[in-house]
Amino acid sequence: METVTITMKNAPALYLEADTISPDAFAGKSATQIAELPVFEGNSPSTLGKYFEISGSAGATAADTKIVVRGDVKKVKYIGFKMTAGEVVIEGSTDQYVGAWMKGGKLTAKGDVGAFAATAMKGGELIIEGNAGNYLGAAYRGDWRGMSGGKILVKGNAGSDIGMYMLGGEIVVNGNTDVHVMTHAEGGKTIIKGNAASKIGGQMVEGTIFVFGSIDVMMPGFKPDGEVELEVDGTKAKFARFIGDMGERHKKKKGIIVYGNLYKKI
Amino acid sequence: MTKTITDVICPFCGTLCDDVEVVVSDDGKKLLEVANACVIGTEKFLHSQSADRVTKPRLRQEDGSWKTISYDEAADYTAKLLAKAKKPLMYGWSSTNCEAQSVGNEIAEVAKACCDNTAAVCHGTTLIAVQDIGLPTCTLGEVKNRADRVIFWGCNPAHAHPRHMSRYSIFPRGFFTGKGQMSRKLVVVDPRCTDTAKMADIHLQIEQGRDYELLNALRVALKGEWLPDTVAGIPAEKIREAADILKSGRFGIIFFGMGVTQSLSKNHNIDEAIALTKDLNEYTKYSIMPMRGHYNVTGSGEVFAWQFGFPYSVDLTRGFARYNPGDSSSIDLLCRGEVDAVFTIGSDPGAHFPISAVKAIAKVDSVCIDPHITPTSGVSKLHVPVAFNGVETGGNCYRMDNVPIDCRKVVDPPEGMMTDLDFLTMVCNRLKKLKGVA
Amino acid sequence: MSELIIKNGYVFDPVQGIKGDKKDICIKDGKIVDKVGSSAKVIDAKDKTVMAGAVEIHAHVAGPKVNLGRIYRPEDKLFSCTPTKGMERMGGGASIPTTFKTGYEYAKMGFAVAMEAAMPPLFSRHVHEEIRDTPIIDEGAFPVFGNNWFVLEYLKNQEIENTAAYCAWLLKVTKGYAIKVVNPGGTEAWGWGLNCLTVNDPVPYFDITPAEIVKGLIEANEYLGLPHSMHIHPNNLGNPGCYETTLDTMKIAQGIKPKNKFGREQVLHLTHTQFHSYGGTNWGDFESKAKEITDFVNKNKNITIDTGNVTLDETTTMTADGPFEHHLTGLNHLKWANCDVELETAAGVVPYIYSPSISVCAIQWAIGLEIALMMKDPMRCYITTDHPNAGPFTRYPRVYKWLMSEKARKAQIDSFKHKDKVLSQTVIGTLDREISLYELAQMTRAGPAKSLGLAAMCGGLKPGMDADVAIYNINPDKPVANPDDIEKAFSRCAAFIKSGVQVVSNGEIVNNGNKRTLWVNVKAKENPQVMRDINEKFVKYYSMTQANYEALGHHFVPNPYAIEVDATN
Amino acid sequence: MANEITVNLISGRTIQQGVAIESGKEKPSYRTACGIIEMDPADLKALGAWRNTNVKVTSAYGSVVVKAVEATQGPHPGVAFIPMGPWANSVVSDNTYSTGMPTFKGTPVKVEVAINEPVLLGVELVQKQCGVKVG
């Protein structure tokens, strides 16, 4: 796997939209060609080379291209935009749309990430060692087809509106989350190891949520349905089970009504 | 002698009353009396005659004083500002007519700016919810002629839309509602016992910030499923009783306002309210309608939509429209420091934005087009007074139910005062010259 | 105005019966003329096909429900917008394009006129504002009448004259073009959440049946002698077995003679016929009844139809048929928007995905093509996609390809997942007819122009007509090697001249042209009773005063083109 | 009789606020209409503040001095109301949860008695907080 290292050398006055920082855009290019890739600061077009020091050359295909992003990229957006393969490592914290519309490959953000990370994710793996912003793994505005595959791990806390309109894939948050988890979800799984604020699983049609910590206010649409012993992500424990959202329409599969499941660790 | 102009449109709130009568002097220079408008509308018409109006553009000097300049210089300043900026924000548009908005859109496209209207702090989250789940709505005449169940959820028309109840929702005697308010049941949901709630048959005094839970509970009650004992401070029995009342009508209408759009979980409150309306459509006929604030914020949304494709928070920096509230919306752009110039028209962000956003406006170069002296003009570099829209100049505007009504000019503006449409056209031509566009 | 001459192109003009022989087209002052001076600018159309500007008879391109569709579908514009380029404003929207893009796309395909299919009269200012912002093409709008309280009350008492007087007043006040009827009676029943599924279901309270509404409005239309006939979207759209309701609706028009001075020969125009030609009792035994429908229309000369072809895309359905959209959201559970308009109509918007792997969608695709292929007289059958309901209008070239090449149809049928079911439920497999360029000119130019009463002005290249000329990169003499070349050629015309000015060259916009708003100005007899009814309803039931309802200032219609109709005799 | 209480702050329109913004935001009438905090009698009692005296309202986002008045549209114990305007917006939460909409309703605030501190005029309040030099 060929590695390209880009280091911030000329911080943008406003915010830098760098949707060309992805293995797919770098594949088959030399350092100089990568430096010519277009980026935008507001409405003024520029090139990657003006903001980043670029060393090493990309692999022939996206799959064997690794990108390491160094320096202060807190005001850089769209890193890993629409990537389908390869690897991206962001040493520090970055801004919005990390791995948005990502189809494959592995993206690791060692610091925090902004909102709209992994929007409408179809596959691949996203690891955020710091905190994640709002709308993690959510659908784009107005789209009823949200995250459909892939795996997201957030070691810190996450924001509100995780996994909105989720269809598949998995999100694990080691820390706490804000309001709204898997709203309108029709599939997929979310595990929250910290506390979840409130409004969990609103208008959920199908899918599973595990909450290890506390929930301030339960959704009235989730009916208690006994307790169950489960092993979740390496933790064996007794969970209080809730089915819902009873206010939403539910499909019948082979005669049985399918509900969303919410498990709260006791 | 005087003459009375009838069928005048009041340019203040989304109710857009169009039966106002204005008495003006024969030469059309002085406005003397206003009839049929509420106290706010009357004040807007009469304030156009006040003596201490700003009539000339003025530029903030280093020492903080205002220097009066000509409209030409003001147009040059604005065009240079927009041409130079890497990410200008053009905010407001809600108290001006659709023709001015159309020219404003042309300016935004040439300047590759972000443009947004007051929906960002009003019904923006409603538009996000509509984009997720749709909007079963109707025009206000349908409410007048058919509604027998009226719900005001998180809105206080007694204060914000004073004539709404007498023109459309509670008191009028429509085609099928001959007994007026006697043929209607009013339900109000509000954490306070507002003046609207005092008129209600049922007032659900909800715990503030828990609208999402209560709406979800109503949908669960409609399906006859299990409910916890109390939801959002309302006992389960009262929720089931309210659900039965909603279900029992022949035509129900839910009006909702800032109570649900501005409190916790924002767009999801409206999302759930629309889902409740769709569920109620299985039992009887139901519609839902946002109580839009400004008289032409709906119009701004419509013009943005048919020219760019999105109703607000439009980002044109790439030469085409992108949209994602939270990234391209005014408050986030300002609080995160993403814009380097601000152009406001037909609104007052200085008074109605959180202070952190107003500080961002004060930090960058900014132009404020407004006939009044406002906190926005107080923090802007250039203040360009223009004629009162709807009083001193006409133009199309859209009511809260998207019905277009053509405003009319009733009195002349002060000597030498330009309309916003003329000023924007001047700015547009100069900007095109600066950018070398045909 | 400069003179123009288009030399050595293969001309197809049904108005003059020219079937592809080489002929020069001379243009002077925006009109076609016999000959021009030597100083005329020459456009060489060698090896190219020359036709008049196309006429779109039915599309939802401007108005409140179109804009509601734009507002509530941001994902329709994600990653698919075109940036500002020179004279072209930015454009966005795959199924519901923004107004600038609508004008440019139609012009690049050689369209000169487009008719907005449904205008709620209360929203006429909105429709005209969007028409004003749609560049280049001429446009007109059809106000909807089929559920209007005035019409329901007058027709209940069979007062054709009062109905006609009201229609004349409304056409003038809204600057509309023709009488459009959508789900007559059903949309008024939708005011209470109900519907009328057959022509004999009475409307709640008004106690009038759709049959009486249809008959009354046809007679009112002929009483006034309007340029276009009554334009109907019958009841029970889109349900299996709805072809019977369509036949019942068309039978109402039997025996009624057209009365107008515009050369129109039909009294009823049945729109998006594909949605109304469904057999079977449920989605399982869903089948095509295109044969029964086209047999009836072939025999009854006073009816014209347009096809409503499905183009197998993800699109947005929007129609004034409120109950159908509520029924559709019940089927696919996608976001549903609806707007009931007081005293007049309603509208519904629901996204829909015509997926080739669903048998129903594939059969719908086949039905649309069968209708066009089984109609004997191309002058009475026009190609539309009921944009955007069955598909975006930008897919017309693909529909032409399917109609003009059996090979292309076969390839599409073979790609269907449920190929055998499609072949068993329809007759598409047995049809080998291929539409010729001349027939295409009839179905997209001369036919719709004649049906709209615009035969003297557009849809042809006869001297005296408007100089709207489209030139396509197709050589009629050379046999078409690959059907996709048809689609490519019709997607971007080589040149398009609108009102004597070249607006498109090699698929690029070079001039914003001088668009007009077409409307019908009817001079009718004074009718004090109707005016009194109108005043009373505005005082008591409308939410807007009559003065503001009638206000349609110059800034809404900057370039009107009124078609005068004298109905005073 | 603690000299400081915590309440949940909401803001919104009132008819007086509507009239005041139309008659001029630089005038005292705007301060009279919007430079107030409507509190439930129980909260006023807990705070130990006389009606129509000035109080200082502080939140995580800022602080402002306004006049405490009895709730006109109550009772709403635990909830305080400042009409929409620069006074309310000096303290409301600007957290938009990435929806673009600040949380105007539902900001926890601390209220303490501040009898001698003045309530500034609308335009002046904003200019002072933004540090705009006014000649």
Image (cartoon, rainbow, N blue to C red):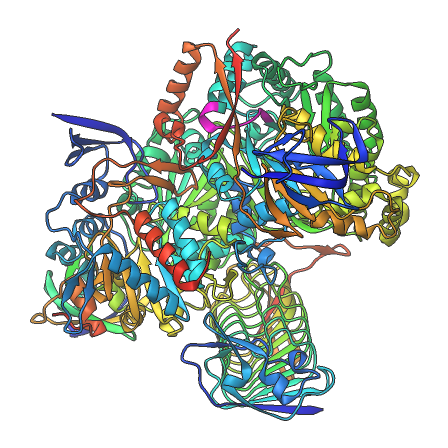
Q: Position of residue C385 (x, y in %)?
A: 70, 40
The image quarter in which residue B391 lies? top left
Q: Position of residue C324 (x, y in %)?
A: 64, 37
The image quarter in which residue B10 lies? top left
Above/below status of D134 relative to A28: above
Instruction: From the viewer's perspective, tell me whether residue C162 is left or right of residue B424.
Output: right
| Residue at the (66%, 65%) spot, across then down | A167
Pick out the residue farthest to the front. Answer: C38
- In the image, B340 versus A242, the foreground residue is B340
The image quarter in which residue B73 lies? bottom left
Above/below status of B33 relative to C396: above
| Residue at the (70%, 33%) spot, across then down | C445
- In the image, C376 versus C84, the foreground residue is C84
Above/below status of C328 relative to C77: above
Q: Is B28 in the magenta?
A: no
The answer to whether residue B75 is visible is yes
Instruction: From the viewer's perspective, tell me whether residue B87 is left or right of residue C440.
Output: left
Q: Position of residue C272 (x, y in %)?
A: 70, 34
Q: Total number of numbered labels?
A: 0
- In the image, C18 versus C215, the foreground residue is C18
Above/below status of C556 relative to D105: above
The answer to whether residue D100 is visible is no
Task: Give the residues in magenta.
Answer: C172-180
Pick out the residue farthest to the top. Answer: C569
Q: Position of residue C186 (x, y in %)?
A: 60, 28
Instruction: From the viewer's perspective, tell me whether residue A59 is left or right of residue B153.
Output: right
